[in-house]
Image (cartoon, rainbow, N blue to C red):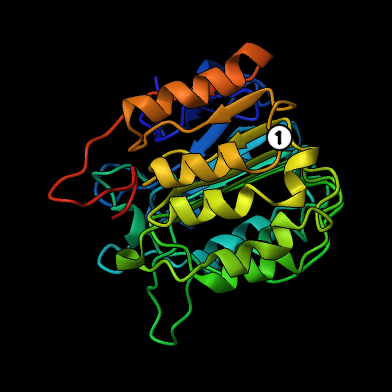
Amino acid sequence: MTLSHISELHGLPVYDFPLPDTSPADLPAADSVAWKISWHEGNGEEDDYASCWDRFLETVDPAGVRALVLGAGAYGTENDYADPRETAELLAAAADRLTGLRALYLADLDFEESELSWIVQDDVSQFLAPFPRLEELGVRGSGNGFSDGTGLEFKPLRHDGLRILRFENGGLPSHVVQGLAASELPALEHLDIWLGEEWYGRTTTVADLAPILDGSRFPALRRLGLQNADIQDEIAAAVASAPVVAQLTALHLGRGALGDAGAEALLSGQPLLHLKELDLSHHFLSDAMMERVRQALEPHGVQVDLSEQEVEEDGERYVVAGE
């Protein structure tokens, strides 16, 4: 059983690293689960997250660990503070022991622990250099908890192993996408970006996405998600003529404020019949437009997800994950 926001990582079930009174003999094999490391003050654990982390490295064979999920204590909010820079230092210091690590998920805090937009992050690209064999990185939140204005960043870099990259966000800053677009990730196959709402800090625009949509930046890309956006119609219109679409097998434009205008742009743009998946779930399409999308694509073998048809509230649309 796990209390995690995510249930699996890298094909492995998430397992909460237990309290100190648990016998090591009762733990699963190091490579059989994605280990979630959390710390909560006052519930009988160690003095701080660093102590909990040290116990994990001493209890579980670090070389066998394939996936890590970092939760409360490693990450927090401005009011329930945890410094992500210290978390990065802990992992970097253990890189020579975590030789089998292939997947990392940063800031698995559920709704009761923190709103999505409040989770304090820093430069997440710093987790990649110590782990050149890392294949999957998931990042949740972008909140700013530092007086110097630091928040979520992704500084340009080259990493030859990363295949899957996810940003789960209620308001994505433009400099994150700009740093990503300037990076060299030749193995990247799956990119999923939640953009969020302007109200919660989204400054990313369609123009910022242009280097990704061009198709030349990530040649191995096959699955692209540009989701959870209050500007979902604009994104759909840009995707409709984007060169990157020709190389994709899956396109995800759901979770956001997509309406008939965005769907019309997709139908009027370049062919989508080569796709295996088109996910538009959580949308504001009319019944007639839903039927047009299905009729245009499903007879050709495209699996279309049009679940969660929403209705505007007082003329307003909403995304799945904002605050």
Specify whether residue 22 is in view: no
Tell me if mark 1 has few (under 14), some (14-19) or many (20+) residues whose alpha carbon lies within 10 angstroms of its own: some
Image side of residue 205 versus residue 271, left or right: left
Q: Nearer the viewer, residue 154 or 38?
A: 154
Q: Residue at x 77, y 50 (%)?
A: 243
- Which residue is tagged 1? 271
Eyeballing the image, is 163 above or below 315? above
Image side of residue 213 versus residue 37, left or right: right
Quadrant position of residue 289: top left
Residue 250 horizontal/vertical position (percent): 66, 31
Residue 125 horizontal/vertical position (percent): 67, 63
Q: Residue furthest left?
A: 314
- The C terminus - image quarter: bottom left
Q: Residue at x 28, y 62 (%)?
A: 80
Q: Nearer the viewer, residue 99 or 278?
A: 278
Q: Residue at x 75, y 26 (%)?
A: 274
- The N terminus - image quarter: top left
Specify whether residue 251 is in view: yes
Q: Nearer the viewer, residue 116 or 104?
A: 116
Q: Secondary structure at mark 1?
A: loop
Under mark 1, the amino acid is Pro
Eyeballing the image, is 113 above or below 211? above
Q: Residue furthest bottom?
A: 148
